[in-house]
Image (cartoon, coloured by chain):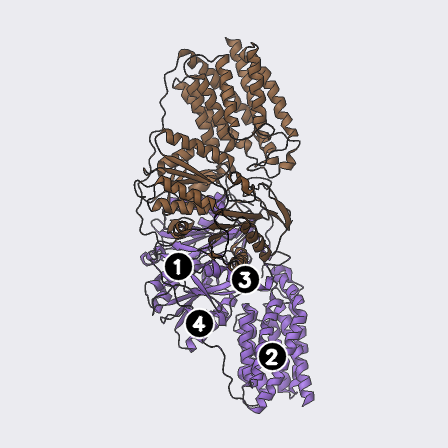
Chain colours: A brown, B purple
Amino acid sequence: MTRLYNDPTAFADEMIDGFARASARWVQRVPGGVTRSTRSEPGTVALVIGGGSGHYPAFGGLVGPGLAHGAALGNLFASPSAQQVRHVSEAADQGGGILLSFGNYAGDVANFGRARDELIAHGVDCRIVTITDDISSAPASERHKRRGIAGDFTVFKCAGAAAERGDDLDDVERIARKANDRTRSFGVAFSGCSLPGAAEPLFTVPEGRMAVGMGIHGEPGIDERDVPTADELAELFVSSLLAELPDDIEDVRGARVAVILNGLGSVKYEELFVVYSGVARRLDAAGIEVVEPEVGELVTSFDMAGASLTLFWLDDELEELWRAPADAPAYSKGSVGPTVAADVWQADDETVPIPEASEASRSAALTVLAAIEALTTIVDEHADELGRIDAVAGDGDHGIGMQRGSGAALVAARDAVERGAGAGTVLALAADAWSDRAGGTSGALWGAVLAALGDALTDDAAPDRASVAAGVTAATTAVLGFGASPGDKTMVDAIVPFRDALTAALDEGDSLAEAWSDAADVTELAAAATADLLPRMGRARPHAEKSLGTPDAGAVSFALIVVAVGAVLRDAATDN
Amino acid sequence: MTRLYNDPTAFADEMIDGFARASARWVQRVPGGVTRSTRSEPGTVALVIGGGSGHYPAFGGLVGPGLAHGAALGNLFASPSAQQVRHVSEAADQGGGILLSFGNYAGDVANFGRARDELIAHGVDCRIVTITDDISSAPASERHKRRGIAGDFTVFKCAGAAAERGDDLDDVERIARKANDRTRSFGVAFSGCSLPGAAEPLFTVPEGRMAVGMGIHGEPGIDERDVPTADELAELFVSSLLAELPDDIEDVRGARVAVILNGLGSVKYEELFVVYSGVARRLDAAGIEVVEPEVGELVTSFDMAGASLTLFWLDDELEELWRAPADAPAYSKGSVGPTVAADVWQADDETVPIPEASEASRSAALTVLAAIEALTTIVDEHADELGRIDAVAGDGDHGIGMQRGSGAALVAARDAVERGAGAGTVLALAADAWSDRAGGTSGALWGAVLAALGDALTDDAAPDRASVAAGVTAATTAVLGFGASPGDKTMVDAIVPFRDALTAALDEGDSLAEAWSDAADVTELAAAATADLLPRMGRARPHAEKSLGTPDAGAVSFALIVVAVGAVLRDAATDN
């Protein structure tokens, strides 16, 4: 269990502070994460990695010569925001373009994706390679749906070495993609882990049992059985991975593999070495040549008891990159040669200029601000309850994340209104602040919702029934773009009925306040009805089956907000 | 808890096998442990470290250029035998002498000490520096009694760097001693750990509580309190260590320290970084300059939850050595430059020639062999019971250790008798085999007992009452030389009464068989009476207070053996 912390909500910040202080030889802190504190060759590609915190050495411990140039560090088990990824990328940029690489989780895909779009919009060439090594998380026919676990490391290692030797962005991307294609992992777990300050473990495995294929956030596995002997586990690992070879390998005899036997936290070195003895003997017997194996902790999950085996099928190009020197806080190989301290990174002045706005839009901005005030209040009031609901099937941080995001949105909206912004700009800046401070999936979703509304409302005319309908429709489309469908027990199950009810009422000629109010009633019912749904397999829904009877926290918070905003719209209609 | 193993008694062997396979870039397996697999400069000093297994990265993970040249790897939490230390030292020797360095525990002191004596007897210059950094384990006035914990690393690092740059043995020893004098550690624990296959944890800490000053094998601490916040722990660490400065530091302002925040196993990186943030801020505030800190796991105790802070007060010489490059399986710093593979080490032919023996002594050797057979049988019969008794106050491995040792002694004795050895040589070879295979404190003690008897019996004349009395007296003196006194609840409480009763009876003219039989009766009572004693604070006696009412396992096994040998002597007397 996690015992040592101060304020649990400050854990990630304090952890990154301590990490950066302890690791100043390799990294410096920048907004959103860390970059190298040593100088890199101008014009080379920068490899930017990242993900939620709680997986050290991933991701900050892997920044340094021969490995990554920067890491975006999210909250505990929550994706960094798009802004974090963009800030770290800008700080790491050396003029050769950016490769973003990370494990395949919905929140990370959304936030890194948005950061890529923004970087490209700002003229920085940027590519994405998501890592999908966990063979238990989807069948071979759907490799793109698989999660990334310890195989993160083989991709980072080869892409980092390629960038270090000066390969261009096309080549670094090609190599990262090839490394991912040739990396397979298989994991087991014996216990869960508890987040700082949590009263209950995030998930559990019955004592004496082993969850086969369980993910690093407790995602459901494919089987459960008694804890085996070390040799039996070695056999399970090796036989499972040899059952799915890369396409070009027909006979394993003579093949070369880099091997990672990764501990998740409290399976310790001694046990890993006993298992590795069995793994190595089995690979030897199969005629496979092991190249520079790693036995230890590279991608962890606090003190979760578990382990995974990764086989990385080398060719000549990949073997050279795997063997290349590297020097990071938590990983070192060979001699990287002398390093030179980099300049301390200075962010550009971040004050965004406020575009001109019409009198009507500036007036509407006051209603927008009142709505954001109201939703922040309702989120604060229900934060604990949202956390409890989320903990049934998720990681219990929905309330905290929504509080962090809405509070930041409110500060940004107030500042924008004071500076004379129109309704569209107020929403756009609130959107950025929300997703940046909340992080995770809910941060990305709410950032997208507010941004879509802001786009529709603009800074020109006063908002009307048509622009609000267009905004809500666009927001719903953006949320659907994150991949969930109706019935998956997510916020989609609230926003789609809301959109349908609102646009129908507006089509029938209702006033905005009336239509919104009616749609809010529909939304409340829809959110409550998610209690009857079973969630689809997702990032942190280990107790999926337990959640029958409990509504989805994202749908509930959406309904709460819609109701609160409806009250503001009624007040505004009355005032006019 | 430790879950992954095959046969628990084979755990250490399999662990070392897996470690050596995974770490072939740095180490090669040799009898007794590992040495570097890379070539070292001829004529330089070899640093040989070691201790019980279960503390990885200590000790095998710290072998490589810039660090140690070899590590003697004992069984779980049990010292390596003198033979192991000697074999590793011989394999690591480069002609510049050997520095043996290890944490200050009774078993290690005994076995490394005997290895040093043997190396010196074979013409190899050899010194010992024991590490005593744990300020909770004895008052400052008795620093030599303190245990070694994470401060092992600062001593190894500086001694290894000094040896690497070519310092002679006098200087390497002086530097190691100075590094130890300037290193202080303070530790806490939140939970115990369980050894492979053990039904119960080796020791426990109540849930929600913190044992202050508890040792890495569960040695009793100095206080117990509720688990504090991370900042409170940082304050406890820093204030405790700043209360005991090295003699030459009067004002800490401007002082330079190397800092190690060490995790014992399941306090994870993220928590350590949060604590480190508080440590670094406090050291900053005190005006202390932190030099290349280490936050992570360097000396562990399986998955025990605990942490310690080490402050290593640098001067110019030590700072240069602390900053020097190193490259080992579990620790790397800077660039050590290219390495060259070493030759695979080949042990000399280990077959010991059998000295000439008189007919009388060869005949007596048959009685000695019968005695060893009898004691092996009695140990086998009582192994489980001895383990249960030992588990009350110790680590429960006394039965296994005695089985391993006596079994090896029997094989060696049979071989020696077949090859025509006299009684003295049979006992000497049995002594070597016992201590080598058993390891730990009981192995060292029984090795010393058999060796003393062998010295007294010689290969010349038939043993008589005088030579047996002399042998038992010398054996008792050797056992007392390990440091325990009567009343400490150890084997001493059985062997001293045995010696006294035997020599008194022989003085009164009893036959050997009669005298032995009477002394055996006395010994049984003395062993049983140890149930009334409280053990002194020792290596693995965390539940000292619980052991009232249970006799000492070492005393009990001694009495069992004395009784069994008495029966053999009676039979022999009857036959003659």
In the displayed structure, would residue A494 be above or below residue A20?
Answer: above
* Same subunit: marks 4 and 3: yes
> Sequence order check: which comes first, mark 4 or mark 1?
1
Q: Is residue A266 among the parts visible in the rendering? A: no
Residue A153 at x, y percent in the picture: 45, 46
The subunit letter for the residue under badge 1 reads B
- Of mark 1 and mark 3, the one earlier in the sequence is 3
> Residue B346 — which label?
4
Q: Nearer the viewer, mark 1 or mark 3?
A: 3
- Residue B343 placed where, x, y %? 40, 68
Chain letter behind tag 3? B
Report how far apart the C-alphas of labels 2 and 1 lie in the structure. 45 Å
Residue B455, visible in the rendered structure = yes
Q: Which residue is mark 2?
A: B499
* Residue depth check, mark 3 versus mark 2: number of the one nearer the observer: 3
The chain identifier of the residue carrying mark 2 reads B
Q: CB atoms at circles 3 and 2 under 8 Å apart? A: no
Q: Position of residue B129 (x, y in %)?
A: 42, 66
